[in-house]
Amino acid sequence: MFFSEYRARRMRRNATIRRMVRETHLRVDDLIYPMFSAFGKGIKKEISSMPGIYQQSIEHIVAEAKEVHELGIPAVILFGIPEHKDPLGQDAYSETGIIQQTIRAIKAEVPELQVITDVCMCEYTDHGHCGVIKDGDVDNDATLQLLAAEALSHARAGADLVAPSDMMDGRVAAIREILDANGFSHIPVMSYAVKYASAYYGPFRDAAESTPQFGDRRSYQMDPANRIEALREAELDVQECADFLMVKPALAYLDILRDLKEHFNLPLVAYNVSGEYSMIKAAAEKGWIDGERVMLETLVGMKRAGADLIITYHAKEAARLLR
């Protein structure tokens, strides 16, 4: 093809023809909305670093879940802020824990909404790490037992999917085994297969009150410089019978999304994390960018890179624009 016989601008002349030839589509069905459930009543506390996102007690969570469902968003993912934290994060796997209560409340009022639960210990431990501490580091195999118990307690409470985010070796297999042994073979595992030790998580740690009290998480989350390792991590989770694979964060790791899309045939999830959300919100508030356009362009970029689903704090505003 040569100019002037071929002119690429013919296909961009107006909004209708651009829509007709558009290659990548962002849909409301692609979105998953994160929610932070806090112990107590009458709580609706905006997270200062995440405008529009709240820590909420269960009655407010249920009200927002109804709003999410009415917007056509198919699923939420739940994170918990318990009343008490301890070295073993016991609220995480208690039958009366904050997430277990929240699951039951949502499913009672909005049964069609898919409830995904984050399976990790960092929100529930007093030290802020994702498992049992031994000799100053997380004990991988001891932590597997607690993660499995947590996932089982979520399934018993009515969760539709469980999503382990801890990055312990072998956790998908441990969760799959305990679910299958207790009559929950139908519950999918959405694995945070590729989760980097990222600076983009800062606002989330405010939201979930999960900042480590010592050290950091680089002994179990991935080095941001590593690409081939991501394929190894994902392959392990595929072998352990994960039903979904996830890449977290998304924006700085679009190449990893594309790699996983090309190597595996499981549904692929991108987590549009708190720092990515907050940067757009802060720049929009300053008037430096068109917040809505940048938000949609960012989400489309994740879809174009290969994501089938996107966990995003923008889900509600995106859904309103896409309807």
Image (cartoon, rainbow, N blue to C red):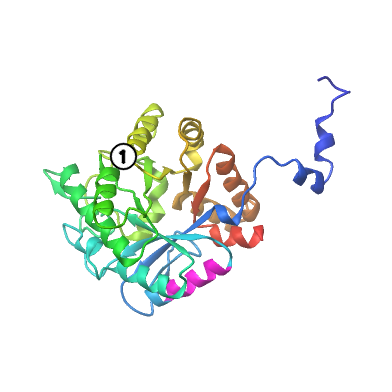
Counting labels gives 1
Residue reaching furthest right? 5
Residue stretch in magenta: 60-70
Q: Nearer the viewer, residue 104 or 204?
A: 104
67, above or below 8, in the image: below
Q: Nearer the viewer, residue 89 or 187?
A: 187
Q: Nearer the viewer, residue 206 or 138?
A: 138
Position of 150 with respect to 274 (left or right) is left
Q: Residue 68, position in %: x, y?
A: 53, 66
Residue 186, quarter of the rendered image: bottom left
Query: Can you see residue 138?
Result: no
Type of the residue with mark 1: Glu
Position of 177 with respect to 291 (left or right) is left
Q: Residue 279, position in %: x, y?
A: 51, 51
Residue that mark 1 sits on: 240
Residue 69 is a magenta residue: yes
Tell me which residue sits at (50%, 42%) in the image: 251
Tell me which residue sits at (50%, 32%) in the image: 255
Query: Can you see residue 140?
Result: yes
Magenta stretch, main secondary structure, is helix
Q: Residue 299, position in %: x, y?
A: 57, 48
Q: Nearer the viewer, residue 303 or 200?
A: 303
Residue 71 is a magenta residue: no
118, above or below 10, in the image: below
